[in-house]
Amino acid sequence: MYEFEFARPTSVAEAVQALGAEEAQALGGGQTLIPTLKQRLAMPSVLVSLTGIAEMTGITTTGDGAVEIGGATCHADVAKGAAAAYPALAALAGQIGDPAVRNRGTIGGSLANNDPAACYPAAALASGATIVTNVREIAADDYFQGMFTTALDEGEIITSVRFPVPQAANYQKFLQPASRFAMVGVFVAKFAEGVRVAVTGASEEGVFRWSEAEAALASSFSPDAIDGLTVAPDGMIGDIHGTRAYRAHLVGVMTKRAVAAAA
Amino acid sequence: MTKVTMTVNGKPMTGEVEGRTLLVSFLRETLGLTGTHVGCDTSQCGACVVHVDGAAVKACTMLALEAEGAEVATIEGQAEADGTLNAIQAAFQEHHGLQCGFCTPGMVMSAAALLKDNPKPTEQEVRHYLEGNLCRCTGYHNIVKAIMAASGQDVSAIAAE
């Protein structure tokens, strides 16, 4: 790692101030950023840890029944703490990485990084979540802007994420066994107004909604509704772990499994 | 350099570190607690697992300054002061849960974290929980057996040896 200063503010206001420094970088749980720093792929002047900010941790249920999770809440806490209010989200959190990684990695860190194979982006997009930052609220549909790209501005901090709770939901992850990221992961969420299907791991553009499947599932929420629907291999990720065609195929398979498990 | 203070195995410890100093480097190089191993240094292998405020973490993927004020537990604090092994360590010895021993500190610390949350895990739960701890010698069977035995369960029906 290159040298950097380290700051561990205890309030969002202090963190925003610290992030105002030239080349400052926010640090969530560090489970992606610290390996990146070790490889000298990043050279921040100041690393601003967000894990000491009490107001950014914890899980609450809002007046309208949504689940709000502090940006610095670790995956293990979501896996336990959201199990009653939003079981599919809790189950997703419990499948990220491994137990030790889940004790450090945070929901805000995952969403800010927007790795194309991360799990949380699928949950946020399928749930129609709201990304709450220190300055504004961003709808998930506007937030994800391609691989490792989000609507966040420089120095903007995800203070919490608000998830509407669907009538039924499920996440199915086809594990890439070496990295434990999703080779393909599909989150299906059924609301009174319709069905949302978000796919992670598959596309070169990062997480995306599969609108054909959403339309089919809105008229019939059953695995059979997916029969005959396919995703074009163009634009899918192709690498040593799986070809474009393989990932495109998996999108259909994992969607069916998620619907079967949710229905 | 910045001063960092934490409690390690029940004792208050202080040292001077850089912003980029990893927790595992602080434990091994500053405090001389070399029981916590660095295997892969990429948060895959789990040889560096320690507990921070009761939670298992990979000490190679956490900065020392992030543990400011925390309670840290390492493999050195697992046995009694007179050297008597704790139940997990004794079970690893009894059931031959190690060969070269490099992964063992992390295995024992992960097992301790598992049994704290889940005192009577099934064999499948033990295997699943160890997904972030790699062992290249044993094939895992005797590690799983040792952890099951440490939880006070009958392991006579579990395969291996």
Image (spheres, rainbow, N blue to C red):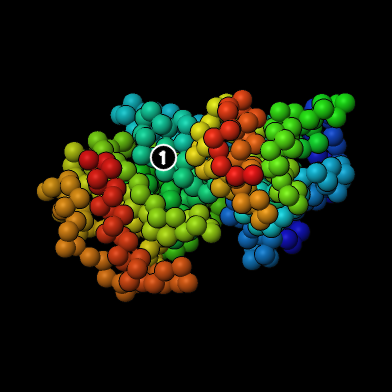
Residue A96: image location, x then y, percent: 49, 47
The percent position of residue A173, horizontal first and vertical second, equals 39, 52
Does A59 appear above or below B139? Answer: above
State the quadrant of the C terminus of chain B.
top right
Residue at 50% x, 57% y: name it: A177
Tell me if A98 is positioned left or right of B41 in this view: left
Residue drawn at (46%, 42%), measured in percent from left and top? A93
Q: Is residue B54 above or below residue B44?
A: above
Would you place residue A70 above or below residue A28 in this image? above
User: Where residue B130 appears, x then y in whole percent?
Assistant: 58, 44
Front residue of B82/A224: it is B82
- Residue depicted at x 20% and y 50%: A223
Residue B123 image point, x, y percent: 52, 37
Chain for mark 1? A
Quadrant for residue B36, please give it: top right
Three-letter code, disc 1: Ala
According to the picture, the residue beneath numbered tag 1 turns out to be: A91
Q: Residue drawn 47% across and 50% down?
A: A111
| A215 relative to A261, above or below | below
Residue A8 visible somewhere in the drawing: no
Label 1 element class: helix
